[in-house]
Image (tube, rainbow, N blue to C red):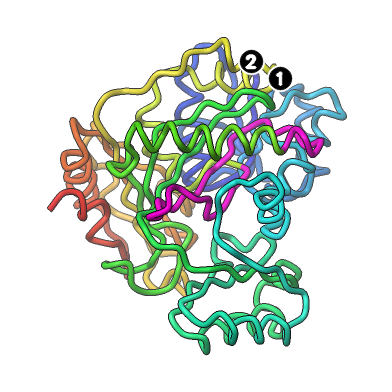
């Protein structure tokens, strides 16, 4: 099969890395890809959000299957456009991708179908939003309604911080159209867990649980990022909690989307808070998470192409998905200053000294004249498996030791709360 993966980050590198292992994938392409993805796939210089150009290229090159990985092209309807041209595509259609593209939609869905989540209100009027903050007090959470690169959420410790976030979004246009509507919700407490699940419109099959580290600095300090590291599985996610999530959250969400005429096919990401009252939904995403995908792909035993086809064909209930024993950890190496301003173009050294038992997924690199340089905020995801979480964490940090570039930054405590 000739397969195209849309996107160019660490998530897409992990997907391509796994697809390249499938005997059924004879030609693998990635658009736009990056320096590391070029090791396993042919990179095509088309922007992930250029729906028209992507569909035209896939048709001209007779692609058998396209994997649409990022949120933006899903929200723009790339899967719909590919299907209209007779090309099979993995990912939710536009009317289902709204579960991530609009937080107001997803919150209303949960309220309507009694799926546990935080108490909230949605606002299009800034003064009404500010008044609500005064009434509710802090801590409180302010979310931009639309897509904001994983950075549209403010967990405010004070009412003034929450009001500033509202003003930045609604008046200051910090996230453009995505912030014209805001969702303000109660601040839930408890451990956070991510569960990504394969879905074919009817059947939902959870992957291993995982935990992401969103804050830029050690001890969960600093601004929110796209993710500074992740591990799987989560020790917090017991079989009892898993059963409850399936019964109260996963299946009801699938059924709710079907009832709304928006059957979900692809990867449905459940961001969960394990509160004293039980598991509740923090957010949905309509695709693989990043960096959670990197350790998950390291642990997956089943042929990923088989899973993708089952999701598209509605036959997921006939497939048994298996995982390796043990655990995996991904450590993100970022450019100094990320997620704010940072410098690009520094040469990266030491990649040839990484132990062979680890895998380095490239998120923001360019390869020129045989030299990799940093070209983004999150640059590399050093990922390793281990017999248990402590072993996986130790091996990821060991594997990262030889890598260096000017101002390179990483957290030193990924997974450490479970290790020390």
Q: Are marks 1 and 2 in contact (CB under 8 Å)?
A: yes
Query: Residue at the location (79% across, 42% down)?
Result: 95
Q: Nearer the viewer, residue 335 or 91?
A: 91
Placement of 418 over or under 411, stated as above or below: above
Label placed on residue 232: none
Residue 367 seen: no
Q: Position of residue 414 (x, y in %)?
A: 27, 54
The residue carrying mark 1 is 64
Furthest residue to the left? Answer: 420
Is the residue marked by circle 1 packed among few (<14), some (14-19), or many (20+) residues within 10 Å?
some
The residue carrying mark 2 is 1
Asked where in the image residue 77 lies, by quadrant, the reply is: top right
Residue 76 seen: yes
Q: Which residues are magenta?
A: 257-286
Q: Assess whether residue 265 is covered by the magenta stretch.
A: yes
Query: Residue at the location (75% across, 26% down)?
Result: 61
Q: Assess whether residue 393 is covered by the magenta stretch.
A: no
């Amino acid at each position: 099969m000739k397969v195209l993966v849309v996107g160019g980050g660490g998530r897409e590198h992990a997907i391509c890395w796994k697809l390249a292992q499938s005997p059924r994938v004879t030609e693998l392409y990635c658009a736009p890809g990056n320096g590391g993805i070029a090791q396993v796939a042919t990179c095509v210089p088309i922007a992930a959000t250029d729906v028209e150009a992507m569909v035209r290229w896939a048709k001209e090159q007779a692609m058998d299957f396209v994997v649409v990985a990022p949120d933006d092209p899903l929200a723009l309807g790339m899967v719909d456009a590919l299907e209209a041209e007779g090309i099979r595509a993995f990912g939710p259609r536009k009317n289902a991708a709204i579960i991530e593209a609009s937080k107001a939609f997803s919150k209303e869905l949960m309220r309507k179908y009694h799926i546990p989540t935080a108490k909230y209100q949605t606002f299009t009027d800034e003064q009404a939003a500010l008044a609500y903050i005064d009434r509710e007090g802090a801590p409180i959470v302010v979310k931009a309604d639309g897509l904001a690169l994983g950075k549209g959420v403010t967990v405010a410790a004070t009412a003034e911080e929450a009001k500033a976030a509202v003003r930045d979004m609604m008046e200051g246009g910090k996230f453009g159209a995505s912030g014209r509507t805001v969702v303000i919700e109660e601040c839930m407490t408890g451990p956070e867990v991510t569960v990504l699940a394969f879905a074919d419109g009817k059947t939902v099959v959870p992957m291993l649980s995982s935990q992401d580290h969103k804050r830029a600095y050690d001890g969960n300090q600093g601004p929110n990022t796209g993710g500074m590291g992740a591990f799987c599985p989560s020790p917090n996610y017991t079989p009892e909690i898993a059963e409850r999530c399936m019964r109260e959250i996963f299946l009801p969400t699938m059924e709710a989307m079907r009832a709304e005429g928006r059957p979900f096919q692809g990867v449905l990401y459940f961001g969960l808070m394990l509160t004293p009252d039980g598991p509740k939904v923090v957010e949905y995403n309509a695709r693989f998470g990043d960096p959670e995908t990197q350790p998950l792909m390291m642990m997956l035993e089943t042929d990923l192409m088989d899973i993708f086809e089952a999701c598209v064909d509605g036959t997921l209930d006939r497939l048994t998905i298996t995982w390796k024993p043990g655990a995996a950890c991904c450590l993100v190496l970022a450019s100094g200053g990320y997620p704010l301003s940072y410098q690009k173009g520094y040469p990266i050294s030491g990649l040839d000294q990484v132990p062979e038992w680890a895998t380095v997924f490239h998120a923001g690199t360019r390869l020129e004249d045989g030299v990799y340089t940093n070209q983004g905020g999150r640059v590399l995801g050093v990922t390793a498996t281990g017999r248990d979480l402590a072993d996986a964490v130790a091996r990821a940090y060991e594997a990262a030791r030889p890598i260096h570039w000017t101002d390179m930054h990483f957290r030193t405590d990924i997974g450490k709360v479970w290790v020390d």
